[in-house]
Image (cartoon, rainbow, N blue to C red):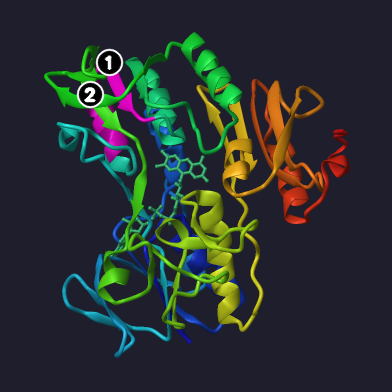
């Protein structure tokens, strides 16, 4: 069986790795325009960390690695085309092309701003040595830029439209995170960024935030160029639609990681997650599917992070706001200590007490508690199974 993987980030690396383990006689070729590195630790390059991931294991399994760009998928011939026109045949194709940062079109001057996705982006920050860095956005990537800016001795100024890491944190925890980071030297400016010009960001039409280097970290869009051109089904014209195993509308083509949907564990509908933890499970699911395995591991949303070397954040499943949006009659309970972290909320369905989500901000590690909650959520346990009593 010939398996071609396009993209050599977390999803591509994981796919090649798992196919090599699951289908030992497969002839695997990975084609990527970058060598793999730990993208979610980009900020640590400012502290001299080497992020490259060894490919020795893949090489020992005779995986062929091609550093190039795939320019086209020829579905009828079942081959991909490289930038020099050379073609590589496949029986199964796994697309792991990731995503690209987006710059909102309504932000005037936004096209001149920096983004934070690839090694060259963090290198640019290091080389330019700015004293003040403005960051537009409140996502975890925005906070990584703030962390990196502080590490090179610059003043980070985060411009927030709504609240920090809104999709993953309860509102009070966004506020708590902001408080902790402000204590560590991050300046927060609340409002709508309108324009970037003359070394400043104009917010709400009247506030001016001075900045020697401005980053936009407001979101990503899936890299779907190849898939779209090949006529694969997309969800909302924006992301590759897959089933629970990662299979696209072409049964011989899979998509994993930031370019594809996952099946939501609550609604069983395809949704976009765009996080590394999901990419890893999606890669395993695609490899398993090639063995004829019919089921799939579920892909819950799980994020954990450490900001500024000491502020831990964990988030699993739905926040109470999202739970309501998904149609659950949800409630939440505040927790602190006993491994839950300094400030935490557990979200549950009112009628069944079933666990729906968890988020925490803490000076202590909370990732393990997040894992416990994740298991409970997947198994549809009530909160009492986690030792939490609610009336
Ligand atoms: C700063 C930062 C912090 C993050 N922190 C977290 C975190 O704490 N937790 C978490 O879960 N996630 C985190 N993420 C998200 C996580 O990094 C991504 O979800 C993950 O990298 C997705 O992996 P991927 O393989 O799908 O895509 P990518 O890592 O983007 O890899 C895709 C690769 O494919 C290549 N490619 C694209 N098209 C082609 C082509 N035609 N031919 C050849 N190669 C191609 C791209 O250049 C790229 O190298 C973070 C991301 C960033 C940027």
Q: Quadrant of residue 144?
A: top left
Indicate whether 20 appears above or below 182.
Answer: below
Kindly identify the residue that appears in the image at 56 percent across and 34 percent down. 305
Q: Quadrant of residue 133?
A: top left
- Whether the residues at callouts 1 and 2 have beta carbons within 8 Å, the answer is yes
The single residue placed furthest to the bottom in the displayed view is 77
Give the labeled residue for mark 1: 132
Give the labeled residue for mark 2: 213
Kindly identify the residue that appears in the image at 71 percent across and 47 percent down. 374
Residue 124 on the magenta span: yes
Indicate whether 321 appears above or below 29.
Answer: above
* Left or right, 192 with reference to 333: left
Q: Nearer the viewer, residue 358 or 371?
A: 358
Q: Position of residue 313 (x, y in %)?
A: 60, 30
Q: Quadrant of residue 155?
A: top left
Q: Is residue 60 visible?
A: yes
Q: Position of residue 391 (x, y in %)?
A: 87, 33
Kindly identify the residue that appears in the image at 42 percent across and 47 percent down. 52
Q: Is residue 47 visible?
A: no
Q: Position of residue 261 (x, y in %)?
A: 47, 61
Secondary element under disc 1, as helix, strand or loop, is strand
Region of the chain picked out in magenta, as a range: 121-137
**Distance of label 1 from label 2 (alpha carbons):** 7 Å
Q: Is mark 1 within 8 Å of ligand 1?
A: no
**How many neighbours does mark 1 have within 10 angstroms: few (below 14), some (14-19), or many (20 or more)?**
many
Please tell me the numbered disc located at residue 3. Answer: none
Kindly identify the residue that appears in the image at 27 percent across and 41 percent down. 120
Secondary element under disc 2, as helix, strand or loop, is strand
């Amino acid at each position: 069986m010939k398996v071609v993987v396009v993209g050599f980030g977390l999803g591509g690396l994981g796919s090649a790795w798992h196919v090599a383990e699951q289908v030992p006689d497969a002839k695997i070729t990975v084609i990527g325009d970058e060598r793999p590195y730990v993208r979610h630790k980009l900020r640590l390059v400012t502290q001299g960390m080497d992020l490259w991931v060894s490919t020795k294991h893949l090489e020992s399994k005779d995986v062929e690695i091609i550093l190039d760009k795939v320019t086209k998928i020829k579905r009828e011939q079942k081959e991909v085309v490289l930038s020099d026109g050379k073609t590589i045949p496949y029986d199964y194709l796994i697309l792991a092309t990731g995503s690209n940062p987006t710059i909102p079109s309504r932000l005037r001057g936004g096209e001149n701003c920096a983004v934070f996705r690839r090694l060259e982006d963090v290198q640019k920050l290091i080389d330019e040595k700015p004293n003040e860095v403005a960051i537009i956005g409140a996502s975890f990537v925005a906070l990584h830029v703030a962390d990196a800016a502080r590490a090179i001795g610059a003043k980070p100024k985060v411009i927030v439209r709504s609240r920090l890491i809104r999709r993953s944190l309860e509102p009070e925890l966004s506020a708590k995170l902001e408080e902790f980071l402000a204590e560590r030297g991050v300046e927060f400016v609340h409002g709508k960024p309108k324009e970037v010009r003359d070394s400043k960001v104009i917010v709400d039409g009247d506030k001016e935030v001075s900045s020697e280097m401005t980053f936009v970290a407001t979101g990503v869009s899936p890299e779907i160029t190849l898939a779209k051109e090949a006529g694969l089904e997309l969800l909302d014209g924006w992301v590759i639609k897959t089933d629970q195993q990662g299979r696209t509308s072409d049964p011989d083509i899979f998509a994993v990681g930031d370019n594809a949907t996952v099946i939501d564990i609550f609604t069983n509908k395809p949704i976009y997650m765009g996080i590394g933890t999901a990419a890893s499970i999606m890669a395993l699911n695609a490899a398993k599917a090639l063995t004829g395995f019919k089921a799939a591991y579920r892909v819950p949303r799980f994020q954990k992070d450490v900001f500024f070397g000491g502020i831990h954040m964990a988030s699993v499943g739905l926040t109470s706001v999202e739970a309501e949006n998904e149609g659950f009659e949800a409630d939440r309970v505040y927790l602190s200590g006993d491994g839950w972290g300094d400030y935490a909320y557990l979200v549950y369905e009112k009628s069944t007490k079933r666990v729906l989500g968890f988020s925490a901000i803490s000076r202590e590690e909370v990732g393990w508690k997040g894992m416990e909650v994740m298991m409970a959520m997947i198994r549809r346990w009530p909160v009492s199974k986690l030792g939490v009593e609610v009336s």
